[in-house]
Image (cartoon, rainbow, N blue to C red):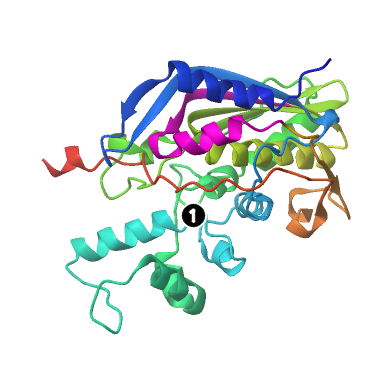
Amino acid sequence: MHKHAEYQYLDIARDILKNGIKQVDRGTGVADYSLFGKQIRFDLSKGFPLLTTKKVYWRGVIEELYWFFSGQTNIKYLVDHNVHIWDDYPYKIFLRKSVMSNDKYTNTTNKQITKDEFIAKIASDSEFAKKWGELPRIYGEMWRKWPTRKKGRTIDQLQWVIDEIKADPNAHNAIVTSWNPEYLYTMAENEDASRFPICHNMYQVSRRGNKLSLQLYQRSADLFLGVPFNIASYSLLTIILAKILKLEPGEFIHTFGDVHIYENHIEQMKEQLKRKPKPFPTVRLVGKINKLEDFTPDKIILENYDPHATIKGELVVAGGLYEGKRKK
């Protein structure tokens, strides 16, 4: 009997719980249990790999992918669509800059505003959102508007990938990267350094006959909360690119560097491991999608998704630029 593809994910979880090495994030003190160098593969002709052993936030998958796909960098789009998976990083940057400038942003009780108040202001105040909702050099910008040394010139990597595969079906170079050392970690000048981590940092697209496959390299992967989302997002990306290129979806291959379970997700992960996977759903594209600009969230239809119940876990805002070294 064929083993359900979701067991690849569950088997990594079991391996981490049994053999994972304990690590501590130096910026936050948060602990996780980690393995290095794993891979899972999904044949997209055999169902859409939206995990079934817990409910995955599908609306968030679609809206975030569209946010990347369209080259956006401001969280206002997500906030306006009630998707809050990127709220923490601009709020963290906002607090840091207000402290550095000795300018306390306050609410009516003269206290520094909370994250909920910050997000409410992003939603209601366009000027505030324009200033404080930006996450420059996030995935959308790097995919569609990669900054170059020539002022005013950017590179649309995603469009280039499509053009390259059309021109050369056997291309070995159809890669999109979000990893730019000029802006990352202590490689960057302080004023340029991104304050959030680039985790799913590179993917390669390959035509194999009449099928299109995509391999993601994820240098750091939160197995419980992040990875189910990443699997769905990049599988959907593969399907959309295949549609644009008039090909069939092939495989989504997910290659991990550091894959880990945070300490505060251990019990939730154990609960998930008690559950048996159900049949994967299917995804159907509707309407015209002949070029990148044709994709909009309303053209994605998810069918026959019948997961087990949601298992909640707190988002761990770890990683990103470590400030300690710079303060010395």
Q: Position of residue 149 (x, y in %)?
A: 43, 42
Q: Quadrant of residue 318?
A: top left
Residue toward you, 6 or 69: 6
- How many numbered marks appear? 1
- On screen, 195 above or below 274? below
Which residue is under mark 1? 86
Q: Amino acid at mark 1?
A: Trp
- On screen, 142 above or below 95? above
- On screen, 67 above or below 213? below
Q: Is 289 situated left or right of 228 in this image?
A: right
Q: Residue 62: in sight, yes or no?
A: yes
Which span of residues is magenta-colored?
Answer: 252-276
Q: Quadrant of the C terminus?
A: top left
Q: Is 83 situated left or right of 66 in this image?
A: left
Q: Residues within 10 Å of mark 1 (few under 14, many from 20)?
A: some
Q: Residue at x 58, y 69 (%)?
A: 80
Q: Residue at x 52, y 59 (%)?
A: 84
Q: Is 5 situated left or right of 181 in this image?
A: right
